[in-house]
């Protein structure tokens, strides 16, 4: 017998991972910021307009979290960065720990014989 809750969770996870990103990172950030402001407005108002505002923020949360916009998909618009561009955005840095006093390291790095 299948567990319906497990199936629901797995289908939800697939919907988040299988949807193709079609909006840029800045659009995602703006969607999340606007959704947060609409939700805050709705919580602050606590009336019919506030409830409507909070409910209307749900699609913006979805757009910001998933990076997929249904309207953009319908009209064929894709402003998402290609994966290669995203990989170039992150820079790898390395650190080396030298277990020596500062003076010894400085002396070694400024020694002309080592440099040449």
Image: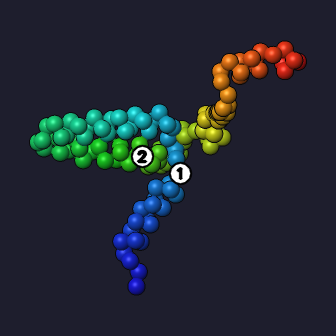
Pointer 2: residues within 10 angstroms few (<14), some, or many (20+)? some
- Using residue 9 as the reference point, say whether residue 84 is left or right of it: right
Residue 20's disc number: 1
SS category of the residue bearing label 1: loop
Judging depth in this view, the residue of 88 and 96 nearest the camera is 96
| In the depicted structure, whether residue 96 falls above or below residue 12 | above
**Residue at screen point 29% across, 43% down:** 57
Question: Mark 2 — residue?
Answer: 65
> Where's residue 82, x and y in %?
62, 41
**Residue at screen point 50% across, 56% down:** 17
- Would residue 36 be visible to someone looking at this image? yes
Judging depth in this view, the residue of 94 and 109 nearest the camera is 109
- Using residue 112 as the reference point, say whether residue 1 is left or right of it: left
> Where's residue 44, x and y in %?
16, 36
> Where's residue 26, x and y in %?
47, 33
Judging depth in this view, the residue of 111 and 96 nearest the camera is 111
**Residue at screen point 60% across, 38% down:** 86
- Would residue 49 be visible to someone looking at this image? no
> Where's residue 40, x and y in %?
23, 37
**Residue at screen point 71% across, 22% down:** 105
Quadrant hosting residue 56: top left
**From the image, which quarter does the N terminus lie in?**
bottom left
Residue 110's disc number: none
**From the image, which quarter does the C terminus lie in?**
top right
**What is the CA distance from the residue labelled 1 to the residue labelled 2?**
12 Å
- Using residue 47 as the reference point, say whether residue 10 is left or right of it: right
Coloring applied to the structure: rainbow
SS category of the residue bearing label 2: helix
Which is nearer the N-term, disc 1 or disc 2? 1
């Amino acid at each position: 017998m299948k567990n319906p809750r497990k199936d629901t969770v797995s289908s939800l996870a697939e919907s988040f991972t299988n949807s193709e990103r079609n909006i840029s990172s800045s659009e995602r950030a703006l969607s999340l910021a606007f959704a947060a402001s609409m939700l805050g407005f709705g919580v602050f108002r606590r009336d019919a307009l506030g409830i409507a505002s909070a409910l209307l923020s749900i699609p913006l949360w979805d757009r910001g979290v998933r990076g997929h916009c249904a309207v953009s998909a319908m009209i064929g618009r894709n402003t998402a960065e290609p994966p290669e561009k995203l990989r170039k955005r992150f820079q790898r840095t390395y650190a080396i720990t030298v277990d020596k006093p500062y003076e010894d390291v400085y002396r070694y790095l400024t020694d002309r014989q080592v440099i040449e």
